[in-house]
Image (tube, rainbow, N blue to C red):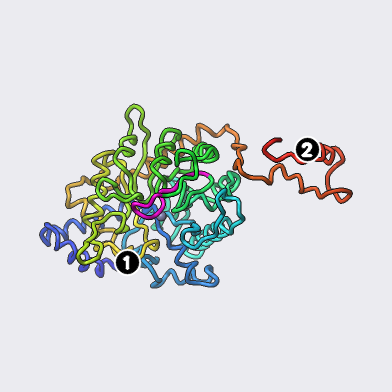
C-alpha cells in the first residue's frame, strides 16, 4: 500500500478546485476511510485486452501484473487506488475496428467466440495466478466475501453479443462460466440487437426492424433474466434501450456510459430513457455506472483541440444522472485500458479516491457515497438474482437465429450408402427432400 505516494498528487489536483487545501486533504482522507470499509466496484476494465494485445502467449504475462504493467492498471496500482471490485471485460473486436466480418446476415464464420473464450480463460488464469490479490465473485455476497478477505472481487462482464455465434447456447454456457453482465452490443450490430455505433452524428445502418432488438434478441433478454445475468445497455441504440426496458423483468444496467444531456454523444444515456428507470409506475430499477472516457463526457476545447475532462466533470455526469434517477442508481466505471485518453485527476487506477473525495466535497452523505462506490450496483445484482430465482423452474429458450440455414443438420449423417443414421432417420431426412430449413 503506497498511500503516502498518492496523497501529494491528489492534494495537488484537489487544490485547483474551490476547496481549500486542508479541506481537500480531509475529504481525501475521508474517501480512503470509506473505501477501506466498503468496496468501490468498477464495472468496466479492459485489462485482459491489454495482456492479449502485448503477448504472444498471454498467460505467460500474468505473473507480471504484480509489478508495473502497461496501461492504466496493474495489481500494485489497484491496491494503491483501493479498488474493491472489478468487472474484467471479455471482448473481441467488431468488424468496424478490425474484427472479423460476419456479413449482413451475421452468418459468416468468425473467430469471435474462440477469442471471447480465450479472454475469459485469461481472466480465470489471472485470478488463479494472483489468488492473494484477486478472488472470483458473481454475487454481492461473494463481492463482500472477497473484500473482507482483503482481495479485489473479480467479476466478469461480456461486451458485445457479436461474439456469441448468434447462439443462445453460447450465452447459457458463458453464464455457467461466470459471466455476470452482457452488453447487448459493442460498436457493431449483432444478430440480437442494434448498436449506437461509435461516432457522434453518424447515421448508422438499420439492420433490425425499428433499430432495436431482433426476435432472437428478445429471447436473449428473457434468457438473461432467467439466468440472472445483468442486461447491459451501454453501446446500444436508444431503440434497443427502450425495447429492453419494456421487456425485461429484471433491472437493467449501463456499465460504462455518461449523461447525454450533459454531453451529446450516442454512447450516453438520454434523459427520456433515464425517466423510465426507478420504482414508480411503469418504471424498472437500474443503475448507470458513469464512465471516464473524455470523448463521452466532454467538454472539448476547439481552440486548443483537446479534451478538458477532469474529475469534476465525471462527478457532473454522476450528479446529473442522479438528479433524474436518484443517488441510489449511479455508480462508477472507468473504462481503464479501453481508452486512449485520460481524465485529469483520474489518470490511472491509483486515482479512484479523487472521485470519491470529489463527491464528499460536493456534500454527498457517507451512505450516498458508499452507494455510488458499489452499494447501488450490489442492490441491482441482488434484484437480478431474485428474478432468476423466481424463474428457476423455467426451461431454456429453444430459439435459434432465424436466418441460419444449417438446421436441421440434414447433412450430418452423410449421404447415399455412406450414412451414419438409423434407417428411419435416413428415411425421414430423405422425405424432407430439398426443402429449405425454414419450410420444415
Ligand atoms: Zn465499451
The x and y percentages for residue 273 are: 33, 38
- What whole-number distance in Å separates the C-alpha atoms at marks 1 and 2? 69 Å
- Please report the residue visible at 63 percent of the width from the left and 45 percent of the height from the top: 404
**Which tag, 1 or 2, sits closer to the chain's start?**
1
Q: Secondary structure at mark 1?
A: loop
Query: Closest to the observer: 241 or 224?
Result: 241
29 displayed left or right of 428: left
Q: Which residues are magenta?
A: 192-203
Q: What label sits on residue 1 in the rendered view?
A: 1
Badge nearest the viewer, 1 or 2 = 2
The residue indicated by pointer 2 is 432
Main secondary-structure element of the magenta-colored stretch: loop
Ligand 1 quadrant assignment = bottom left
Q: Could one spot residue 366 in this view of the protein?
A: yes
Q: Nearer the viewer, residue 125 or 131?
A: 125
**Quadrant including the N terminus:** bottom left
Residue 229 — which label?
A: none
Residue 294 location (% of width, % of height): 29, 59
What is the quadrant of residue 66 in the picture? Answer: bottom left
Residue in the image at 26% along x and 39% along y = 324
Eyeballing the image, is 390 above or below 362? above
Label 2, residues with CA under 10 Å away: few <14, some 14-19, many ≥20: few
Any magenta on residue 201? yes
Amino acid at each position: 500500500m503506497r498511500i503516502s505516494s498518492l496523497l501529494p498528487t491528489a492534494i495537488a489536483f484537489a487544490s485547483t478546485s474551490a476547496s481549500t487545501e486542508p479541506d481537500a486533504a480531509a475529504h481525501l482522507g475521508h474517501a480512503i476511510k470509506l473505501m477501506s470499509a466498503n468496496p468501490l466496484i468498477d464495472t468496466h476494465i479492459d485489462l485482459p485486452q491489454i495482456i492479449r494485445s502485448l503477448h504472444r502467449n498471454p498467460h505467460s504475462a500474468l505473473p507480471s501484473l504484480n509489478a508495473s504493467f502497461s496501461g492504466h492498471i496493474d495489481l500494485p496500482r489497484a491496491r494503491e487506488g483501493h479498488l474493491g471490485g472489478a468487472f474484467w471485460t471479455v471482448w473481441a473486436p467488431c468488424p468496424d475496428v478490425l474484427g472479423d466480418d460476419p456479413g449482413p446476415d451475421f452468418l459468416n464464420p468468425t473467430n469471435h467466440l474462440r477469442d471471447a473464450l480465450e479472454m475469459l480463460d485469461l481472466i480465470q488464469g489471472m485470478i488463479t495466478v494472483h489468488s492473494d490479490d484477486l478472488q472470483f465473485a458473481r454475487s454481492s455476497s461473494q463481492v463482500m466475501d472477497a473484500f473482507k478477505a482483503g482481495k479485489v472481487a473479480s467479476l466478469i462482464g461480456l461486451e458485445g453479443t457479436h461474439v456469441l455465434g448468434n447462439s443462445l447456447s453460447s450465452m447459457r454456457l458463458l453464464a455457467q462460466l461466470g459471466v455476470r453482465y452482457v452488453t447487448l452490443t459493442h460498436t457493431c450490430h449483432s444478430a440480437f440487437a442494434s448498436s449506437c455505433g461509435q461516432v457522434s452524428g453518424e447515421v448508422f445502418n438499420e439492420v433490425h426492424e425499428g433499430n432495436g432488438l431482433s426476435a432472437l434478441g428478445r429471447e436473449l433478454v428473457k434468457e438473461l433474466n432467467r439466468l440472472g445475468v445483468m442486461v447491459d445497455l451501454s453501446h446500444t441504440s436508444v431503440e434497443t434501450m427502450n425495447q429492453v426496458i419494456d421487456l425485461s423483468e429484471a433491472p437493467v444496467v449501463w456499465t460504462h456510459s455518461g449523461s447525454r444531456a450533459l454531453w451529446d454523444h450516442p454512447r450516453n444515456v438520454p434523459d427520456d430513457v433515464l425517466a423510465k428507470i426507478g420504482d414508480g409506475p411503469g418504471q424498472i430499477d437500474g443503475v448507470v455506472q458513469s464512465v471516464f472516457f473524455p470523448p463521452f463526457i466532454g467538454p472539448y476545447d476547439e481552440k486548443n483541440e483537446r479534451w478538458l475532462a477532469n474529475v469534476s466533470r465525471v462527478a457532473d455526469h454522476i450528479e446529473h444522472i442522479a438528479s433524474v434517477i436518484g443517488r441510489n442508481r449511479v455508480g462508477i466505471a472507468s473504462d481503464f485500458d479501453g481508452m486512449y485518453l485520460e481524465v485529469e485527476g483520474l489518470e490511472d487506477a491509483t486515482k479512484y479516491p479523487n472521485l470519491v473525495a470529489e463527491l464528499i466535497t460536493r456534500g454527498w452523505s457517507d451512505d450516498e457515497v458508499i452507494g455510488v462506490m458499489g452499494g447501488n450496483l450490489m442492490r441491482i445484482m441482488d434484484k437480478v438474482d431474485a428474478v432468476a430465482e423466481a424463474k428457476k423452474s423455467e426451461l431454456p429458450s429453444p430459439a435459434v437465429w432465424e436466418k441460419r440455414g444449417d438446421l436441421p443438420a440434414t447433412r450430418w449423417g452423410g449421404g447415399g450408402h455412406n450414412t451414419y443414421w438409423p434407417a428411419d432417420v435416413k428415411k425421414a431426412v430423405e422425405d424432407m427432400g430439398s426443402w429449405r430449413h425454414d419450410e420444415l
